[in-house]
Image: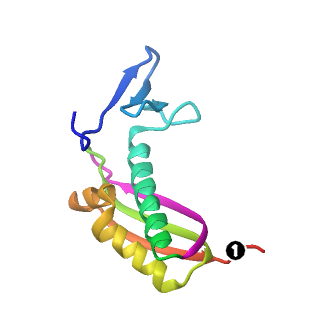
Amino acid sequence: MSKNTKSARAVWTGEGMEFHAVLGSGYEFEMSGNAGTHGGSPMEFLLAGVAGCTAVDIVMILKKKRKAIVGVEVEIIGTRADVIPAVYTDAELFYTITGDVDEKAVEDAIRLTKEKYCSASIMFAAAGVQFSTKYEIMAQEK
């Protein structure tokens, strides 16, 4: 298998719409068609993939710029179509960056993750998802 090949497996537990998922890395989690505390829905995991992908990029870019960050949080809210297939049509990303970092560095990092680095959000955009982004910079508590 190529290093660019990824895998995942979902195994029905035999109850309702509950599945046990195993990623190629070995990480395991619960997934459910009826999302709740027992497992997230597959569509929620797609959003989590975008949030995680862009968060990794933001940390990488700001550290490369030698910015003193102590926290990065990305929240994503996706809106799905009202008809089947209920694909995501819009997504709002909210970035909270904590540390000693300037607005230009954060704006550059968001632009780079959106246009160049985050494969997950770029795939969503290619499928027609309209993205909006907002950010907040929080000073590091002393």
- For the magenta stretch, what is the residue range? 67-83
Q: Nearer the viewer, residue 54 or 91?
A: 54
Q: Position of residue 6 (x, y in %)?
A: 29, 38
Q: Nearer the viewer, residue 78 or 116?
A: 116
Q: Position of residue 119 (x, y in %)?
A: 29, 57
Task: Name the image quarter holding residue 96.
Answer: bottom right
User: At x 56% / y 30%, what residue is drawn?
Assistant: 38
Q: How is the image coloured?
A: rainbow
Let me know if residue 15 is in the magenta part. Answer: no
| 101 over 69 or under it: above or below | below
Q: Main secondary structure of the magenta part?
A: strand
Farthest residue to the right: give it: 142
Q: Nearer the viewer, residue 92 or 120?
A: 120
Tell whether 61 sits left or right of 67. Answer: left
Tell whether 24 sits left or right of 93. Answer: left
Q: Position of residue 83 (x, y in %)?
A: 28, 48
Element assignment for label 1:
loop
User: At x 45% / y 59%, what residue is drawn?
Assistant: 56
Residue, disc 1: 140
Q: Inspect the image, locate mark 1, and give the three-letter code of the amino acid beneath it.
A: Gln
Let me know if residue 75 is in the magenta part. Answer: yes
Q: Position of residue 41 (x, y in %)?
A: 44, 38
Task: Name the image quarter holding residue 140.
Answer: bottom right
Farthest residue to the top: give it: 14
Q: Nearer the viewer, residue 29 or 112?
A: 112
Location of the C terminus by quadrant is bottom right
Location of the N terminus by quadrant is top left
User: At x 33% / y 60%, what residue is drawn?
Assistant: 118
